[in-house]
Image: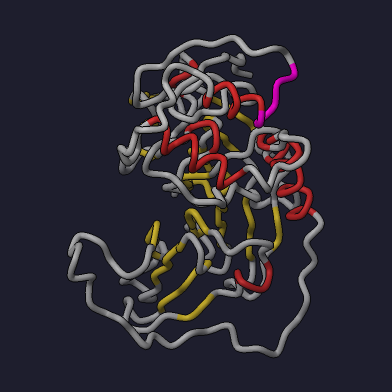
Amino acid sequence: MKHITYILASILLCCFFPAFNTNINAQEITLPSGSNFYDYIEAARTSEFYDDADTIEGGFKSKIDRLELSWGNRLYPHGDFMIANRAIIDYAENFQYIPSDVDPNWICVGPSNTPSNNPSRGVGQIHRIAFDPNYGITNQTVYAASGFGGLWRSENGGDNWVNVNTDLYLPMTTVADVVVSPVDGNTIFIGTGLPDGGVAFKYSSNWSSINPVYTTGVYRSTDYGTSWHPVNDGLLEDFYNYGGVIRKMEIDKSNPNIIFLATSNGVYKTTNALADTPEWNNVFQGYSDEDGDFRVIKYKPGSSDVLYAASNNIFKSTDGGSS
C-alpha cells in the first residue's frame, strides 16, 4: 500500500491519506502522529498560506473553509476519516432489500434545454453508456449509468428509458459503469461510486460536494436487472479505510469471466465473474504513488491480450493484464 506523506496543500487531508497529486505548489508541514481532521484545519488556518483577506475562488482560504463546512460536523468528535469510510461500507454490506409496490420509474417533465448562462452544461449527468453485445443484431438495448439516478435501460435505441431496479437493490444509487456479458444479455455487472468525482485525498477546487459518494463495490444481476446482488470478495476491504471510487469497467468479449476495474485505488481483475462468488485482485497500481488513481481501462479491439490503462500515465499490457 502507498505510504503516508504529511503535506499542507490544496486542502488535502495529509494526515489520513496516501501520497497524492495537487494542483498548487505543496508546502510541507510535519504534524504529530495521531493528528486528526481538526488538527489539520487548525494547522492550515495558522499557517502562512491562510489569509483572511483572500477572496479568490479556489484559493487556499476558500478551500480550507469549504473543507471545514463539508466535513467539520460530519467527523465530530473523532475527526477520523477512517471511521467515516468504514461506516459507509458497513452500511452497504448490511443493506437489506425491502420489496415495494412503488413504481420507481420517472417521466421526464423538463427542462430539456440547456442553461442559458452556460450552454456547455446539461441538465443532468449520465456518466457511462453501454450497448448490449448483440445490439443491432437481436436487440436495440442500451444502458445508461448515472451518478445519482442509478442504472437505466432502453430497448429501442434510446427512445424510451426505464429504471433497472438499482434504486431498490442498491444501498446508494450511484452507478459508475455497466458491462453486459457477451454470451448472456441477462447477466449484467455494475460498478458503484461517483466515477468522475474526486475522493477526499484527491480534493481539488472543482470538487466541493459534501458527499463524495464512495464505491460500495460491484453488483451483478443474472435476471436482466430484476434483482441485484453484491459480488465483492477481495475488493471492498481495500477501500475500507480510505474510501474511493470505481471509474470504469471492461469485460473480455471472448471470456465473460474476465472483468477489469479501473479505480481510484488501482486496477482490479476477476477471472471468475460468472461464479457464485467472484473474487477480485488488485493487479496494478502503476509505478509510483501518483499513478494509483486510474480513470479508464480498455481492451484493444479484437484482442484479449492487449489492454491500455490510464491514470497519471498511460500503461499497456500485452499479456491480458498479467504485467
Q: How is the image coloured?
A: secondary structure
Residue in view at x 69 percent, y 27 percent: 36
Total marks drawn? 0
Which residue is at the front of the view, 41 or 151? 41
Q: Quadrant of residue 18?
A: top right
Viewer-side residue, 175 vs 23: 23
Left or right: where 90 falls relative to 320: right
Percent position of residue 235, x then y: 67, 39
Q: Which residues are magenta?
A: 34-38
Q: Nearer the viewer, residue 270 or 109?
A: 109
Q: Is residue 252 visible?
A: no
Say whether residue 35 is magenta.
yes
Q: Residue at x 64, y 66 (%)?
A: 222
Quadrant of residue 307 in the image? top left
Q: Is residue 100 left or right of residue 217?
A: right
Residue at 31% in and 43% down: 301
Q: Main secondary structure of the magenta part?
A: loop
In x, y percent, where is residue 309? 39, 31
Residue 194 lies in magenta, yes or no?
A: no
